[in-house]
Image (cartoon, rainbow, N blue to C red):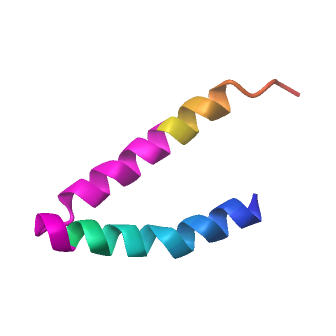
Amino acid sequence: MAAGFSFGQIVGPIFAGQVAQITGGLTVPSLVAVGALLIGAALTLRLPGP
C-alpha cells in the first residue's frame, strides 16, 4: 500500500504538470484525480467484510 501511495506522489504532479501545460489549466488533471478517487472508493466497497 505504501508503494502505491509513493508511486502516486511521484507520478501525480508530473502528470498534472504535463497535462496543465497542454490544456492551459488544472481542470483536466483535477477531474482525472477525482475519477481516480471515485474508482478507489468504489473498489473499497468490494472488499470483504471483517
Q: Is residue 37 above or below residue 41?
A: below
- Considering every residue shown, the one lying at the far left of the view is 24
Instruction: Point out residue 19 in the picture as x, y percentages from the top left corner.
Output: 25, 65
Q: How many numbered marks are there? A: 0
Residue at the image point whose x is 33% and y is 68% from the top: 16
Tell me the quadrant of the picture where the N terminus can be found.
bottom right
Instruction: Give 11 or 34, whichever is nearer the viewer.
Output: 11
Is 14 part of what is drawn in magenta?
Answer: no
Residue at the image point whose x is 39% and y is 53% from the top: 33
Q: In which quarter of the image is residue 46?
A: top right
Q: Is residue 33 above or below residue 40?
A: below
Instruction: Give 11 or 38, whichever is nearer the viewer.
Output: 11
Instruction: Give 26 or 23, whichever is nearer the viewer.
Output: 23
Q: What stretch is highlighted in magenta?
A: 21-38
Q: Main secondary structure of the magenta part?
A: helix
In this rendering, position of residue 50 left or right of residue 1: right
Residue at the image point whose x is 64% and y is 27% from the top: 45
Q: In which quarter of the image is residue 10?
A: bottom right
Instruction: Point out residue 38 in the picture as x, y percentages from the top left corner.
Output: 46, 38
Q: In which quarter of the image is residue 5?
A: bottom right
Instruction: Point out residue 20 in the picture as x, y percentages from the top left corner.
Output: 21, 69
Tell me the quadrant of the picture where the C terminus can be found.
top right
- Considering every residue shown, the one lying at the far right of the view is 50
Residue at the image point whose x is 66% and y is 34% from the top: 44
